[in-house]
Image: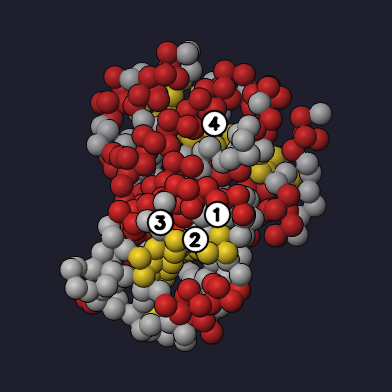
Amino acid sequence: MRVGTVKETKTHEYRVGLTPESVQDLTSQGHEVLVESGAGDGIGATDTDYQVAGAQVLGTAAEVFAAAEMIVKVKEPSKAERAMLREGQILYAYLHLAADAELTRDLVRSGAVCIAYETVTDAGGGLPLLKPMSQVAGRMAIQAGATALQKEHGGRGVLLGGVPGVLPAKVVVIGGGMVGANAAQMAAGLGADVTILERNAEVLEKLGLHFEGRAKTRYSSKANLADSISQADLVIGAVLIPGAAAPKLVSRAMLGTMKKGAVLVDVAIDQGGCFETSRPTTHADPTYIVDGIVHYCVANMPGAVARTSTYALNNVTLPLASAIADLGWQEAMRRNPHLLAGLNVWKGHVTCPPVASQHGYELLPAETVLA
């Protein structure tokens, strides 16, 4: 199969869909790999590195899209890239369609076969292709929040861990999944006063055993959420409903109960955000202030640590990319129902239930596509 990867176009997005090492694996299996010139610059991988690995380096993204049977990306395709997709071409990337009606419409119109990293599952019910970026984003959320709390960035001027004689910052993490647990780990490690809000009793129990008092857990009722928010210096939004838009858990009215200069970091912004006042920002201009509360809502947080993120991502995406290239997407999905869960759009049809429901499309179940 001819597999292509291109330079990411999102603002300050430095990750790349395939590393030179991944290219070498694919070419050693007999596949042809096409790489846009400069695609790996953000992780320190040169065109020569890709050529040594067996790739053909092309001058533009348009050339890669025109020649490749499968496009491997990190982030969803831009409007210009969506216009390059053709019927039957495979797109393998993060898509987050529930939060973007225009993107969904364009992918439906393209006739492409669109496989979303974030809805691929595993035997334990987890999301293995989302997991490494959730780990990165959760840890980065604390770094970003700590910076935003500094006075020159509009924050309260509070140090997360405090100092002897001065209390540490109160950090509230909404959601105890992969993002939330990693955020809490980082915050607790810095000495902050951490509370994790979660509704699942089993998750609460696991978090309690894991943190052993270094972070507190609290059931995420409306009353407990409101009370915790009112005391917080930093709030991390870490909720996820796989494939669906994030619920709006913190209303604008609740901002009025918060300390002026407190910070909200919305890691769920890719799925629409879990704060009513959230809107996507970029690494170039990451924060804004609403009612005295600093909002950090960068939609591609892991892109700032591109090398770590790219290699962590390739570790989990490459085996499935290899299976698709070896077998074709249909046979790969017949053999692996967890990959089938990643099919979001197929030749003009929406095959992911939450996306179809969110945007009003008639659902064509992914199982029917293979039947």
* Pointer 2 residue: 217
Residue 70, numbered circle: 4
Q: Residues within 10 Å of mark 1 (few under 14, many from 20)?
A: many
Q: Nearer the viewer, residue 306 or 104?
A: 306
Q: Label 4 amino acid?
A: Met
* Pointer 3 residue: 213
- Badge 3 marks a residue whose secondary structure is loop
Instruction: Tell me residue 346's x, y (percent).
Output: 70, 40
Above or below residue 337? Residue 135 is below
Q: Nearer the viewer, residue 1 or 322?
A: 322
Instruction: Tell me residue 130's x, y (percent).
Output: 51, 43
Instruction: Tell me residue 344's x, y (percent).
Output: 66, 44
Q: Label 3 amino acid?
A: Gly
Q: Label 2 amino acid?
A: Thr
Between discs 4 and 3, the one toward the N terminus: 4
Residues at discs 4 and 1 in contact (Cβ within 8 Å)? no
Left or right relative to 347: residue 25 = left
Between discs 1 and 2, the one toward the N terminus: 1
Separation (CA) of disc 4 from disc 1: 41 Å
Instruction: Tell me residue 123's x, y (percent).
Output: 63, 32
Between discs 4 and 2, the one toward the N terminus: 4
Residue 358 lies in quadrant: bottom right
Residues at discs 1 and 2 in contact (Cβ within 8 Å)? yes
* Pointer 1 residue: 204
- Badge 2 marks a residue whose secondary structure is strand
Residue 200 lies in quadrant: bottom right
Separation (CA) of disc 4 from disc 2: 44 Å
